[in-house]
Image (spheres, rainbow, N blue to C red):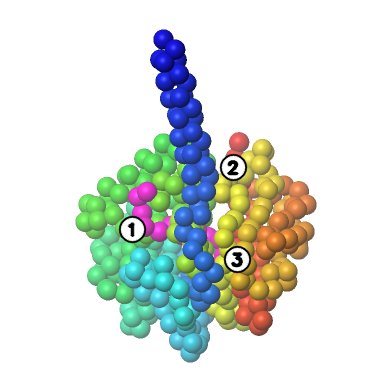
Amino acid sequence: MIIKKIFSFVASIISLFIFNLLIITSSISDDSSIKYYSNDEGILSLMYHRFNEHKYPSTNIQMSIFKEQIEMIQKSDYNFFDPNKFKEKFKTPKKNKEILITIDDAFQSFYLEAWPYLKINKIPFILFVSTEPVGKKGYMTWSQIKEVEAEEFALIGHHSHAHNYLIDGSNDNFIRDIEKANKIFLTKLGYVPSLFSYPFGEYSNFIKNYISENFEFGFGQHSGVIDVNKNEFELPRFPINENYGDLKRFKSIIDLFPLEYKQLLPIEKILDEDNNPPLFKVKFFKKQKNIKDINCYSNELGKWKKSNTNISDQTLTIKFRGSFLPRRGRINCSLNDDGKWRWFGIQFPIKNN
């Protein structure tokens, strides 16, 4: 009897140890891609939506401006990044920065306006497609999507089925949405795209983990430059539109470089009444110089202001002025690193209760 009790006690201790280990492993899962200070020149990803649709300035770009932006990249020292080589090249530090073009939503205006230009110039890009609106007014058809996909420099990405605010529904609804899109992609294209773009750039830790188990990479809508230490399922992109797409600003964007970090907290980006404002901390590599000169701006209380930052032992913390307001909170940080401007941004979706 005594031996049986001892065995039971030891078994319970082992079970508790395993449970705690799983919790710890889960809590640091975002550090799985951390390697070392790589001095990666990075992949700078640009996000577009509509073309020559002036009624939607927040998501539209004029074709004349778009062409000038492409020409500016071509005249620079940066090459266009081939998304077909994403998996192959992601883990290798880039000696020369590359520019990745991404287009969300597969609007008809992309096909009519931008596609002929990109095709003639063979400029590589990702077209992220939501399956539900395909063929509806204002959106591309499946035959048009297949036409684009047939070119070796174009890649089709996954953008959910209904393009809903994924965090507003249940986790089960989110999974059903992705599975429905997967079936349609299989029927129409014969495969499920391996790159995912979160609608509106919003995701919970559950959503991100699900995407990580079913896709190769996930793209958000927070600004920054991709480097080997970025989480593969929280990849940043700079949104380009009429409001923020003038050539002077565009030049300053494509000249930015990664600001690499070891760890960024909180892992959960969704904010609610219990964690708004968040406890925000970023741990940088020791080899990153000039970190004391970092400048951050955040939009808590609905107003963009310089953040109240503190730097200690290569770790940045921010004391926010108050809560972030719906629908999204944002933080953008820049660093003049001996004349090379580095940047990273974070987006916090606000959960509707």
Outermost residue to the bottom? 75
Q: Are marks 2 and 3 in contact (CB under 8 Å)?
A: no
Going 45% across and 86% down the picture, which residue do you hit?
A: 74
Whether residue 195 is visible here, answered yes or no, is yes
Residue 132 locus on image (x, y percent): 36, 50
> Which quadrant of the figure contains the C terminus?
top right
Camera sees residue 56 = no
Q: Nearer the viewer, residue 145 or 323?
A: 323
- Near-viewer residue (212 or 315): 315
Give the residue type that dot 1 points to. Answer: Ser
Q: Residue 352 colored magenta?
A: no
The amino acid beneath tag 2 is: Lys
Which residue corresponds to mark 1? Answer: 194
Mark 1 lies on a secondary structure that is: loop
Per the model, the C-alpha gap separating discs 3 and 1 is: 31 Å
Residue at the far front in the pictured view: 3
Ranked by sequence position, the earlier of labels 2 and 3 is 3
Query: Which label sits in the foreground, 3 or 1?
Result: 3
Left or right: 322, with 148 as reference point? right
- For the N terminus, the image quarter is top left
Residue for point 59% across, 69% down? 259
Label 3 belongs to which residue?
285
Disc 2/disc 3 C-alpha distance (Å): 32 Å
Nearer to us of marks 2 and 1 is: 1
Are discs 3 and 1 less than 8 Å apart at CB?
no
Predominant secondary structure, magenta span: loop
Residue labelled with disc 2:
351
Query: Disc 3 residue type?
Result: Phe
Check disc 3 and report its element: helix, strand or loop: loop
In this rendering, which labeled residue sits more in front, label 2 or label 3?
3
Q: Which residues are magenta?
A: 213-225
Q: Would residue 111 be found to the left or right of residue 63 on screen?
A: left
